[in-house]
């Protein structure tokens, strides 16, 4: 730059006006931007984890309900009266006669 393009700043009441130093302002803006981006990133992560937790809780409720249903089914299938009824009607089984019983001593 030539001296002709550089103008001196005016004096007001004996004080010379200076051009502001932009480095601290730009540093502050960069810091503010970094903090803002970190905040947004952390909120996105929290939202994603909340969604994942919600899915896992829903899955856990489904598995718990299935476990209860299977326990109920196991209890009904192991009922001795039901076993005897299936053995007699579907499998055509009957109680053994006394001649068919062999004692093992």
Image (cartoon, rainbow, N blue to C red):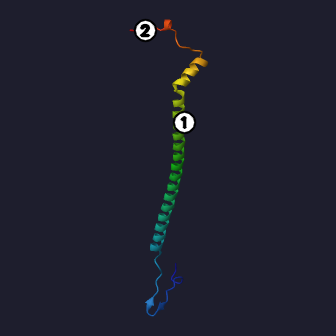
Helix, strand or loop status at disc 2: loop
Instruction: Kindly identify the residue that appears in the image at 54 percent across and 27 percent down.
Output: 77
Q: Is residue 79 left or right of residue 90?
A: left
Q: Which residue is mark 1?
A: 69
Give the residue drawn at x 48%, y 68%: 32
Residue that label 2 marks: 103
Residue 68, percent across and down? 52, 37
Can you tell which of label 2 and label 1 is closer to the viewer? Answer: 2
Tell me residue 57's x, y (percent).
51, 47
Q: Examine the rendered structure and indicate whether residue 28 appears above or below residue 51.
A: below
Identify the residue shown where x is 52% and y is 46%.
56
User: For mark 1, does the 10 Å Cα neighbourhood hold few (<14), some (14 to 19), or many (20 or more) residues?
Assistant: few
Residue sticking out furthest to the front: 98
Q: Residue at 54%, 30% (x, y): give it.
A: 76
- Where 103 sits versus 35, above or below? above
Position of residue 7 relative to residue 82, above or below, is below
Q: Earlier in the sequence, mark 2 or mark 1?
A: 1
On the question of residue 90 being in view, the answer is no
Distance Cα–Cα, label 2 vs label 1: 41 Å
Q: How many C-alpha atoms fall within 10 Å of the one at disc 2: few (<14), some, or many (≥20)?
A: few
Q: Check the image and name the residue furthest to the bottom.
A: 13
In which quadrant will I find the C terminus? top left
In the rendering, at what x and y percent does residue 97 appear?
Answer: 52, 9
Q: Nearer the viewer, residue 66 or 101?
A: 101
- Please name whichever residue, 26 or 80, is drawn nearer the observer in this view of the structure: 80
Q: Name the residue at the left extreme.
A: 105
């Amino acid at each position: 730059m030539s001296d002709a393009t550089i103008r001196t700043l005016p004096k007001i009441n004996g004080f010379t006006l200076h051009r502001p130093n932009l480095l601290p302002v730009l540093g502050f803006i960069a810091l503010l931007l970094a903090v803002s981006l970190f905040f947004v990133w952390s909120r996105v992560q929290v939202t994603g984890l909340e969604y994942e937790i919600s899915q896992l809780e829903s899955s856990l409720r489904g598995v718990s309900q299935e476990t209860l249903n299977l326990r109920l089914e196991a209890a009904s299938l192991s009922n001795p009266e039901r076993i005897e009824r299936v053995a007699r009607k579907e499998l055509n089984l009957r109680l053994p006669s006394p001649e068919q019983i062999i004692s093992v001593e």
